Amino acid sequence: MTASSARFVFRPLPLNPRSPALAFPRRCHRPYLLQQLQRSSLPRTSVRNASTAETSSEQPIRTKTTGNNNSFRKALFRTSLAIVIVGGYFYLTDTRASVHRYVVVPLIRWIYPDAEDAHHAGVAALKKLYNLGLHPRERDGPDQDGSLSTEVFGYTLSNPIGISGGLDKHADIPDPLFALGPAIVEVGGTTPLPQEGNPKPRVFRLPSQSAMINRYGLNSLGADHMAAVLKERVRAFAYANGFGLHDIAEERVLNGEAGVPPGSLKEGKLLAVQIAKNKITPESDIEAVTRDYVYCVERLGKYADILVVNVSSPNTPGLRDLQATAPLTAILKGVVDAAKKTDRKTKPYVMVKVSPDEDSGEQVAGICHAVRESGVDGVIVGNTTNRRPDPLPKGFVLPPSEQDVLKETGGYSGPQLFDRTVALVARYRAMLDSQEGPKVIFASGGITNGKQAQAVLDAGASVAMMYTAVVYGGVGTVTRVKNELRAEKEQK
Ligand SMILES: Cc1cc2nc3c(=O)[nH]c(=O)nc-3n(C[C@H](O)[C@H](O)[C@H](O)COP(=O)(O)O)c2cc1C
């Protein structure tokens, strides 16, 4: 096409006063659809004036036909609109919709260049949508066939997938997260007193690796805040389920009268609450450190199915030193004793979340010894790593901007952790099995798909937990991984 042929040609309006175009001089500059709508809403007299070619004997028949057409168009428009709204609602609120992974995630990354801002926006959106009943959710009860059911602490979980600590730091969205399909949601970590964490920026993306580096430093609104949020949640549940509004209603739900676990408030699911010490509490003072954890247990124990003791975040100075056998045994004993005193019929289970970096034979043996001595119920293996794993696929060279990100201080998370996670799970399994009493293992670190979830389960974990995969994969990640896991099981 030549440039001149693409030019618009201006044609003056016809000057014939009987022309319909002149009868509606302002309308002819409007879009066609608007003209049609406007025409249909005009009084009949105007239509008659405009159509001077029409004879008076033809008029009633023509008006009636136009009226029928208009009603039909309106009905068609309304029906189409209703179909689009209802269809859109069912599509957008379904975790299987690929729009979540391929449109929403890139859009959020584009709108929020800072990963922490994106995190806050995501949490706020999920919370808002849940309150409006417009949140993404699993439809058609995919877990109901029982093919993914698994036993944890003698309880039957609907599936072996969990969401790791840190995604919902302040317990803002446990229910929207449960709606995405996991059987375990871990909220926190929370500390006894509120603390701000490290200065921003403190979260960084490595998009080519679907990985992240963070040095949040356990920013927390404090255990009392989280307890108040979780209490409110139980009260709302009690009221909605006919237990009333009083303290006694909360107690009845927490004591199991609703027939659901007191933490998750959902059949086949468990809520884990992660606790940690404040940064200002000196790690050399084990009594003070233990008091920090016990404080959290006393505030939060009754709202949790599982309490997770975090001694493995790399961003609180000295925290990982607490994994040495003697301090760990003392802290875990304190937590287990406090958990036993929880004011609830069933007591929360206690797990300890360990680092993937303290992985020498001696360190693993020491942690397992502390687990046995303290009576802790299980271990979450592991957390982010201080190491900088080789990029994937093998031989891939990071773009310069990501090479700079790699120099940031903080814990690395993402698919590159997976091989080490699966190996470490197997070692903990062997070590814990050689001791008295069965211990549960949850795996965390680099799990991205169903094959990997199956691999950590085969290595001895009961639950495969994810964080970074959800950040990059969006709200449909858990559903996708569970579908892949089902396919893995069918192939076996
Ligand atoms: C931004 C961010 C914040 C995190 N916050 C916590 C936390 O508060 N407590 C914790 O135990 N782990 C935290 N983690 C670690 C994750 O729970 C998980 O153990 C780790 O990222 C490895 O799993 P992944 O590769 O599936 O992400 C955080 C991870 C990320 C990326």
Image: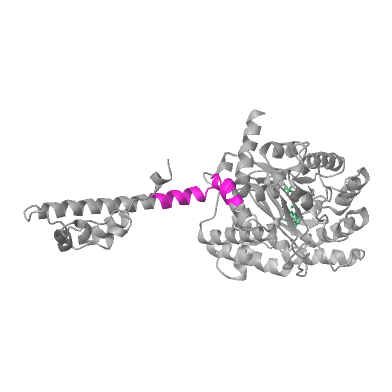
Q: Position of residue 395 (x, y in %)?
A: 78, 36
Numbered range of the magenta stretch: 83-106
Quarter of the image with the C terminus in it: top right
Front-lying residue, 419 or 205? 205
Q: Quadrant of residue 462?
A: top right
- Give the mark count: 0
The residue positioned 40% from the left and 46% from the top of the image is: 4
Q: Taking 250 as reference, is 404 above or below it? A: above
Q: Nearer the viewer, residue 57 or 330?
A: 57
Is 289 contained in the magenta span? no
The reply to whether residue 81 is visible in this rendering is yes
Which scheme is used to colour this image of the protein? one colour
Kindly indicate the quadrant of the structure image that contains residue 480. top right
| Secondary structure character of the magenta stretch overall | helix
Residue at horizontal 77%, vertical 70%? Answer: 193
Left or right: residue 399 compared with residue 386: left
User: Residue 479 appears at what percent x and percent y?
Assistant: 60, 44
- Residue 97: percent from the left, percent from the top? 53, 45
In this rendering, does residue 267 appear at all? Answer: no
**Of the pair 371 and 319, the residue shown nearer to us:** 319
- Check the image and report above or below for 372 versus 481: below
Compare residues 414 and 337 and report the one nearer the observer.
Answer: 414
> From the viewer's perspective, is 336 left or right of 35?
right
Residue extending furthest toward the top: 491
In the picture shown, does residue 131 fall above or below 353? below
